[in-house]
Image (tube, grey):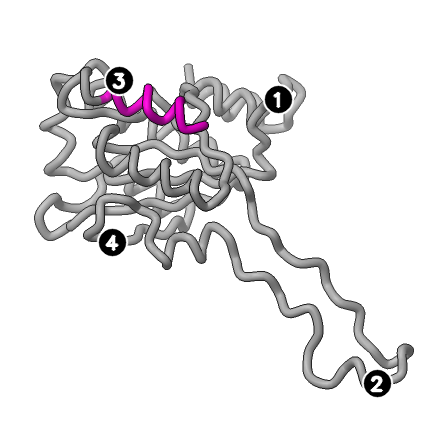
Amino acid sequence: MLIDADDSQLLLVDYQLRLMPALSGAGAAGAEAVANAVRLAQAAHLLQVPIWATEQNPDKLGPTDAALLAVLHDAKARVLHKMQFSACTDELLRALRPPARPTQGGNARSLPKHLQKAVPPQDEGRAAVVVAGCEAHVCLMQTALELLEHEFEVWVVTDACASRTERNRDAAFDRLAGAGAELVTTEMVVFEWLRSAEHPLFRQVQGLIK
């Protein structure tokens, strides 16, 4: 199964200024994780994949990294604040899966058929959530596990995630894979979103990787 851009949303969890320096010792260092998060956000913006981002206790951990925040601003992405470790607040879940439209309004059923308005198809939202963030074994993992509980398809971008230690990061990936999340890399996501070298945005998106 490949990731479909038309069915995807991108969720970036807690790439914050005071958190990232503490992750520099992990295998996927904080700087590398941010750089890949920027690439994901740029590709999503070009390919019209909706983007969401979160900040954990920003008064203590600061705002989102400036380079990533600039891309989020260009994409008009929402940045949601939170105190719980999982990003799956009620607000985010409502945004990821819009409420179904009402099937009928008022007393329309009592009208003659030729006066009844056609019922629009329900908006079921996008089922796949491509997610990355920090720390991998805390906020990222709890977010991904809750998304699975809410029956989303979850794709965790491993090279855009980081923890303070490799052991914590790798334990998170093992647990997520066992729970049903797909573990992918930034390039895997981007080229699956494109699918073909004939995509009209191929050169622009490829340039983000190279």
Kindly indicate the quadrant of the structure image that contains residue 18: top left
Q: Secondary structure at mark 1?
A: loop
Three-letter amino acid code of the residue under disc 4: His
Q: Considering only order in the chain, which callout, 3 or 4, is on the residue closer to the N terminus?
A: 4
Q: CA distance from mark 3 to mark 1?
A: 29 Å
Q: CA distance from mark 1 to mark 2?
A: 48 Å
Query: Is 177 in the magenta?
Result: yes
Residue drawn at x 43%, y 20% as measured from the top left: 184
Residue 81's tag is 4
The residue singled out by tag 1 in the image is 195
Q: Secondary structure at mark 3?
A: helix
Q: Secondary structure at mark 4?
A: strand
Three-letter amino acid code of the residue under disc 2: Leu
Q: Could you classify mark 4 by the number of other residues whose Cα lies within 10 Å: few (under 14), some (14-19), or many (20 or more)? A: some
The residue singled out by tag 3 in the image is 170
Residue drawn at x 15%, y 50% as measured from the top left: 57
Q: CA distance from mark 4 to mark 2?
A: 46 Å
Q: Considering only order in the chain, which callout, 4 or 1, is on the residue closer to the N terminus?
A: 4
Which mark lies nearer to you, 4 or 3? 3
Q: Secondary structure at mark 2?
A: loop
Q: Considering only order in the chain, which callout, 3 or 2, is on the residue closer to the N terminus?
A: 2
Q: Quadrant of the N terminus?
A: top right
Q: In this orientation, does residue 208 appear?
A: yes
The residue singled out by tag 2 in the image is 111
Residue interval drawn in magenta: 169-180
